[in-house]
Amino acid sequence: PAAIAVAALLAYATLIRVNGFIATVPLAVLLLPTRNRPALSAGIAVAAGAAILGLTPIINHRMLGSEPSDVAKTQPLFDLAAIAAATPASPSPFTSAERLEIARRHCVKAFFWDPLGDPSGCASATRRLIGEPAWLLNSELARQAALHPMAYAQHRFAHWNSTERWLVAPGLPDAAPPVEAEPNDLGLQTPGSPIAAAWQDAAAAEAATPVGWPIVWTVVALFILLPALRRRDEPAGRLALALLGSAIALELSFLAISIASDLRYHLWPMIASPLALILLSDDLRLKRHEWIAWGAVLSMTIAGGIIERDSLPPAPDSYEGMIHAVSG
């Protein structure tokens, strides 16, 4: 019964977001008896990922009745616009007028894709391309990334830094939990309990500290991966390894697949990593030089984030402010 419940939850988590499989497949594979055979586990993971990518559209559109949208096109447009802005003299899928508008309105931002699709931003410059098929945009992105690898890499790392909330301005928005419900016809209302409001305030305060930075938990996950591997034959080590594999895979995927810096996208890794740390806390099995090395890396990570926040002006505190900011 427990296995059935876990499988159902993993299936739900896989289907609920297009990149859900990046977290769920490593978690499931590392819980299987084949986990001690790396080649076989890798093969299962690749096959499962391919099957999910092929079956998900069929399940979502034909079985569940969801309607297609242009969301799948935002990722290639985000990256294509960044490459076009960084290489103004090179051929691009954007016209000269579209590129000029994107540059003039400062619509390429590491923080998120939204200015490129917002009517008050650069929606008019992306309207033509968003009408193209997603496969064509992804094909063009692959070509542009191959032609301009440095521009692509710089853009993706800048966004990864932003979504990891590492070397960023203070007060970056979309970290605190929402204080009111989104408009909906499901009857979901803003919680009226003062306890809920107090909890949201506490979470907002925590998000402003290193404990609320995804980069910190990414470093912690990498730090305790070795102890988990050393204890993979123990129940606690096996579960910790599965949690860490899932968390690290999702965090690294943001280097290529991510268009926004909302903290909510990192909540699973930020939960999985401390759970793994708790599981391993009775015996981390680290040598002295490993403690020193990882302690130095974690300290420098936190120090860098604090210094950057202290030296940069505060970020705009609203969605509209971020849309129209000249940087970010």
Image: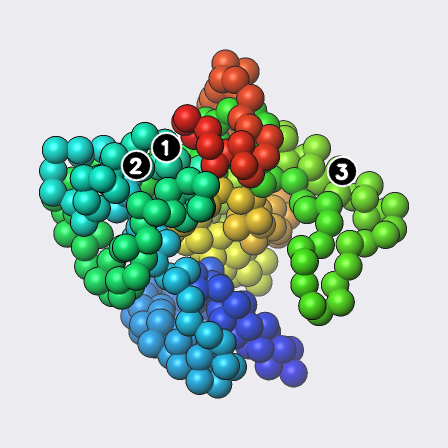
What secondary structure is found at the residue carrying circle 3? helix
Residue at the extreme bottom of the image, as rendered:
63
Judging by the rendered image, the residue that carries numbered circle 1 is 105
Residue placed most toward the observer, 256 or 290: 256
Q: Is residue 12 above or below residue 206?
A: below
Give the percent coordinates (x, y) of residue 152: 24, 40
Q: Earlier in the sequence, mark 3 or mark 1?
A: 1
> Which three-letter amino acid code belongs to the residue tagged 1?
Arg
Instruction: Point out which mark residue 101 bears.
Output: 2
**Is disc 1 placed on a helix, strand or loop?**
loop
**Left or right relative to 276: residue 148:** left
Q: Are marks 2 and 1 in contact (CB under 8 Å)?
A: yes
| In-image side of 67 versus 284 (left or right) | left
Identify the residue at horizontal 68%, vertical 46% (top origin): 178
Residue 49 seen: yes
Residue 134 appears at what percent x and percent y? 29, 63
Colour mode? rainbow
Q: Pointer 2: residues within 10 angstroms few (<14), some, or many (20+)?
A: some
Sequence-earlier tag: 3 or 2: 2
Decide which of 116, 112 is in the foreground and name it.
116
Q: CA distance from mark 3 to mark 1?
A: 34 Å
Using a 10 Å C-alpha cutoff, classify the residue at mark 1 as few (fewer than 14 neighbours), some (14 to 19) or many (20 or more).
some
The reply to whether discs 3 and 1 touch (Cβ–Cβ < 8 Å) is no
- Please, is residue 189 above or below residue 210 in the view? below
CA neighbours of label 3 inside 10 A, class few (<14), some (14 to 19), many (20+) = some
